[in-house]
Image (cartoon, rainbow, N blue to C red):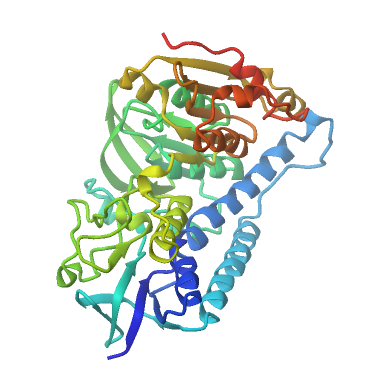
Amino acid sequence: MPQFDAIVIGSGQAGPSLTARLTGAGMTVAFVEREHFGGTCVNDGCIPTKALVASAQAAHIARRAADYGVTIGGTVSVDMQAVKARKDAIVAHSRTGVEKWVRGMQGCTVYFGHARFTGPKQVSVNGETLSADKIFINVGARASVPPIPGIDRVPHLINTSMMDVDFLPDHLIVLGGSYIGLEFAQMYRRFGSAVTVIEALPRLVPREDQDISAAIAEILTSGGVEVRTGAKALAVAKRGDGIAVDIEGSQGRATVTGSHLLVAIGRRPNTDELGLDKSGVAIDARGFIQVDDQLRTNVDGIYALGDCNGRAAFTHTSYNDYEILAANLLDNDPRRISDRITAYALYIDPPLGRCGMTEAEVRASGRPALKANWSMQRVGRAVERSETQGFMKILVDRDSRQILGASLLGLNADEVIHEILDLMYAKAPYTVLQRAMHIHPTVSEYLPTMLGSLTPLA
C-alpha cells in the first residue's frame, strides 16, 4: 500500500495550490483527479463562461456601433463555432497549465481516476489503495436537476453541456433566474437567440435586495430577454422539434415553447460516490461535508475544501479555503472561515458586485444604519461609455461608521467593489474612503461623493 503524508482529491481551485504548499514543506502528496485538471472554474465555470460573455459583449457593442458614431457595413452575425473554438482554446491553455504545474511538483504523485474511501486513512484509485494521515477533499459540485415531470424524457442542457454548444439555439428556455441562468440568458440573447427565463420565486436573484432584483430584470428585458417570475414549472415535454414547459403563476397556467432547455436550478456536491460512509466523515441532508471554522471534518486528519463543504460556492472562496488550511497547518496562523466577508459578482453586463450585508439583512439586524444610493446615470465614465444602466448602494453602521455592505450594479462594478471590500477588512470608518482623492474619470471616483450623501436608513 503506497503511503503518503497527504492525499489531495480534486484539482479545483484549492487542490493544486494546497499541494504546492504541502510539497514545498517537504511532504509527499498523492494528487487524485478523475476527469479534467482545473475543476469547475477552468473547465465549466468562470473561465469558459466569462470567455463567452466577452464574445457576447463584442456582438452587443458591434450592433450598437452607430450609437458611438461608428459605421459597420452589413448585418452583425455571430459564428458560434468560432466562439466555442476561442473559449476552448482559453480553457485548454488554463487546464494544461494546471496539469503541468501539478505534475512538476517534487514529491507529488498524480493518480488519474476516481477516488473512493476504504477507511478513515485509505483511498482507493483504479483498484490501488493509497494511505495518508491527512486527506483533503476538494471534489466540487455539479448541476442539480429537479424532478419536474417529463424532464427525464426531454433532452436538456446544464452548465457543463452548454460548453459543447457550437450552434445558435432558435429559442433557449432557461429554468432558473439566478446567477448561472442569467449569465447564459443574456449572452445567448446577444448571440441572437430568443431567450425566456422562468423563475419560480417572485423575482430574479431573490438573494439580492428587491431594488437590485428589479434593476437586473430591467437590464435583461431591455436587452430582449423575456422574464417570467413567480412561474413554477409543472411539466416538460417534447413539442414537435422543440420543448414545451408548462408553468403556473399568479396569472394562471401557460406553456412556454422553445427549441432548447437549460436547467440552472441549484448545485449539488460531488460527494455521493466517494465512499464517505467508509471514512466516517459526516455530511448534511444535501450531501455537503460538514466542517468546522478551520475546515476540519469530524474525522481527525480529514479536511474538506471548496464547493463540497457548503460554505460558499465560488472560486475565490475555494482558494480562500486553501489559504486558511495552509495558514493553520503550515504557518501557525489560526485563520478561520468566519473571518471572511461575503463577496461575489454576477457577470451579466453590466455586472453586479456585492460585499457584506444586503439592505434586507441590515434591516433585519435592527442596528441603526445609514444608506447612500447613486444612479449610474450620474457617473461621468458611464455616460461617456453610454452604459448608464444600474445604480450603486452602500450601507454603513451609524455608530461605528464602518461599512456594512454594498451592492454595485453597473459599469466596472465587479472591480470597483474591491475598494469597499478592502476598507471593510481594514475595519476602517467610511470617512477614510470619503476623504480619499480618486482619479477622474472613473467609476470609483463617485464612491467618496456617494458616501457624502448618506442618510438614515428609514
Q: Is residue 442 left or right of residue 146?
A: right
**Quick check: 243 above or below 269?**
above
Q: Is residue 389 left or right of residue 214?
A: right
Count of marks overlaid on the render: 0
Residue 209, quarter of the rendered image: top left
Residue 158 spot, x, y in % from top left = 39, 54
Determine the residue located farthest toward the bottom in the rendered image.
1
Residue 247 spot, x, y in % from top left = 29, 33
Residue 120, quarter of the rendered image: bottom left
- At a point 32% along the width and 27% down the height, the residue shown is 230
Choose between 189 and 61: the one closer to the eye. 61
- At a point 69% along the width and 44% down the height, the residue shown is 58
Q: Determine if residue 163 is in view.
A: yes
Residue 40 spot, x, y in % from top left = 45, 60
The image quadrant where one finds the C terminus is: top left
- At a point 44% along the width and 36% down the height, the residue shown is 196
Residue 145 spot, x, y in % from top left = 29, 51
Determine the residue located farthest toward the front in the rendered image.
332
Q: Is residue 158 left or right of residue 63?
A: left
Q: Determine if residue 142 is in view.
A: no
**Quick check: 360 above or below 101?**
above
- At a point 35% along the width and 76% down the height, the residue shown is 7
**Quick check: 82 above or below 247?**
below
Residue 431, quarter of the rendered image: top right
